[in-house]
Amino acid sequence: MVSLANGPFQCLTLSLLILPPILLTTYFMAAFPSPPEPLVIYPSLESLPKAHSSWEIYPEDFYQGGAYARFPYGKVRYWLIGPEDGKKVVLIHGLSIPAMIWKDVAPALASRGYRVLLYDLYGRGYSDAPSTTYSAALYTAQLALLMQHIKWDKAHVVGVSMGGAIAAAFTSQFPYLVEDRVVLIACAGMMDSSDLPRTAKFMSSPLVQTLTGSSLVRSYLQHLISSKGNTSLMVSAHVATEADNPEQQPLTGEGEAEATHPVKVFTTKEAGDGRIQEIVRIQSAHLPGYNAAVASSLRDGPIRGLTSAFADGDAWDNKRVVVIHGTKDNTVPYKYAARIKETIERAVGERSAGGVNVKVVTVEGGKHGLTVSHPKLVVDEISGLFS
């Protein structure tokens, strides 16, 4: 009985003897963590010499009404076109191609009386590239700050590819900033990992990103660009993800494109010759933050894993949604159009009596680059939704 009684007592005694020296040692030896490193922000196309071909292909004033907004994660380039009293529409581009992807859509919308906001996502075009995780939250915060900057209380949102996923995430996270119309074109966000191209998976790996981020590899890419030689696998992966070299469908029958187009109008041949693809190559070779931004978007961003955003019944309640998708889309397969529609309708049906109207527009034979291959269809669907 004595030994049993003494056991716990001895343990307590030893603890009282040992703990004070340990605590005192920890107190005097403890060092406060190092202060956080400042955020590294890489430059945009604005940093390239004026003589560089990028200024001809995608100049800073590609659209009228351009300006910069300075936010904690770097400068953002944006443009406002169309009448100031028009219905407000935001156009969100996708993974690799900046706002020039809307070259045949934005001017046509402006000519039809809409006030159109375009901007380059972080890491693309003329917006800075912060060295951070390119998550859906980064992109939605960028748009929320931009709308605050231009003093827009609400807007209709339109997104293509990854931009569609950003539009969905924005609707879920900031429903009070979204009017009742949302257009999702070749929309990502719910993709299964198995549907991502193997090349994209490989090129977004941390090891490959470390290699492609080195000055030696970027110098080699710049040499290839300047010599008009073959581009790297990295550049090919970016181009294949979003621009499938479609045959352009001209904007005809309305008379608006040539009359008020505030940007250079590319002919079908020029589009086919790779002007859009060329800007992807230039970004990959000359912008130190571009490849990392694209890779992080593939790994951590709104390409996948956004089912919860589409299933947010409260956010989509009383919305009118148009999902435009091509049957030959090899980047975001056509099956995801139906999945998006079903997810939104099921979520709203379970939570509210208000309802939601989701319309799927099927483009027979359409590939991923619908804003380039079928701009009139896109413009007509947007206008029809708002009429």
Image (cartoon, rainbow, N blue to C red):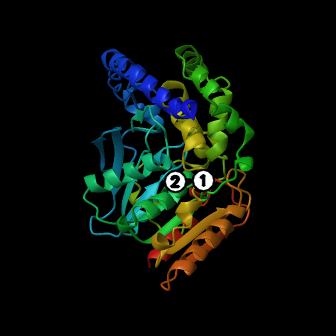
Secondary element at tag 2: helix
Residue kind at label 1, given as amino acid type: Gly
Q: Amino acid at mark 2?
A: Gly
Look at the image and tell me in which quarter the C terminus lies. bottom left
User: In screen coordinates, is 322 left or right of 29?
Assistant: right
- Asked if the residue under mark 1 is in contact with the one under mark 2, i.e. CB atoms within 8 Å, the reply is no
**Residue ID for mark 2:** 163
In the figure, residue 23 lies in which quadrant?
top left
Q: Position of residue 366 (x, y in %)?
A: 69, 60
* Residue situated in front as seen by the camera: 265 or 120: 120
Q: Where residue 25 appears, x then y in whole percent?
A: 36, 16
Distance of label 2 from label 1 (alpha carbons): 14 Å
Image point (28%, 55%), residue name? 148
Q: Residue at x 52, y 47 (%)?
A: 266
Tag 1 or tag 2, which sits nearer the N-term? 2
Residue 349, picture quadrant: bottom right
Within-10-Å neighbours for mark 2: few <14, some 14–19, many 20+: many
Q: Position of residue 385 (x, y in %)?
A: 49, 75
90 relative position to 197: left or right: left
In front: mark 2 or mark 1?
A: 1
- 252 or 41, nearer to the observer: 41
In the picture, the disc for residue 305 is 1
Residue drawn at x 55%, y 71% is: 322
- Residue 215 visible (yes or no): yes
Q: Nearer the viewer, residue 101 or 4?
A: 4
- Residue 16 tag number: none
Q: Quadrant of residue 345?
A: bottom right
